[in-house]
Image (cartoon, helix red, strand yellow):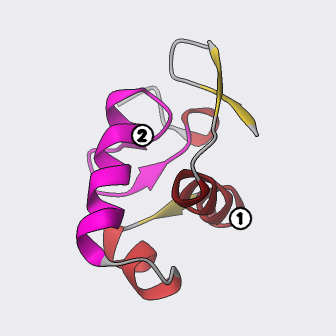
Amino acid sequence: MKIKNIRNQEIEIKHPVDEQIINHMNEYEKCLFGDLVKNLDIPYNELLKHVIELKNKGLIVKEMNGFFTLPSYADTEK
């Protein structure tokens, strides 16, 4: 699976947890971390680690309102 980061660079997603997170976010556009915890069968600490890594790579964005989204859905005007 490949996805573009916030800098419009294409990055390959290889880890199955990362793929689950990206697929969930692709389906719902925006979600809170609690939504990921409820909907994905992944231990909390592992999920948190992967969300932080994806955010640091620019593959997901945390908006001002606390929602996580993919860069293509991000509100860039805030």
Residue 13, numbered circle? none
Tell which tag, 1 or 2, sits nearer the viewer: 2
Image quadrant in which the N terminus is located:
top right
Q: Residues within 10 Å of mark 2 (few under 14, many from 20)?
A: some
User: What's the residue at 31%, 64% (across, down)?
Assistant: 46
Disc 1 designates what residue?
27
Q: Amino acid at mark 1?
A: Glu
| Magenta stretch, residue numbers | 44-70
Closer to us: 64 or 41 = 41
Residue 54, numbered circle? 2
User: What's the residue at 56%, 42% (across, down)?
Assistant: 70
Image quadrant in which the C terminus is located:
top left
Up/down of 26 relative to 62, above or below:
below
Q: Are marks 1 and 2 in contact (CB under 8 Å)?
A: no
The answer for how far apart the CA atoms under marks 1 and 2 are is 17 Å
Element marked by disc 2: helix
User: What's the residue at 37%, 51% (across, down)?
Assistant: 50
To which quarter of the image does residue 67 belong?
A: bottom left
Up/down of 46 relative to 19, above or below:
below
Element marked by disc 1: helix
User: What's the residue at 61%, 63% (across, down)?
Assistant: 20
Q: Is residue 59 covered in magenta?
A: yes
Q: Residues within 10 Å of mark 1 (few under 14, many from 20)?
A: few
| Marks 1 and 2, the one that precedes in the sequence | 1
Q: Amino acid at mark 2?
A: Leu
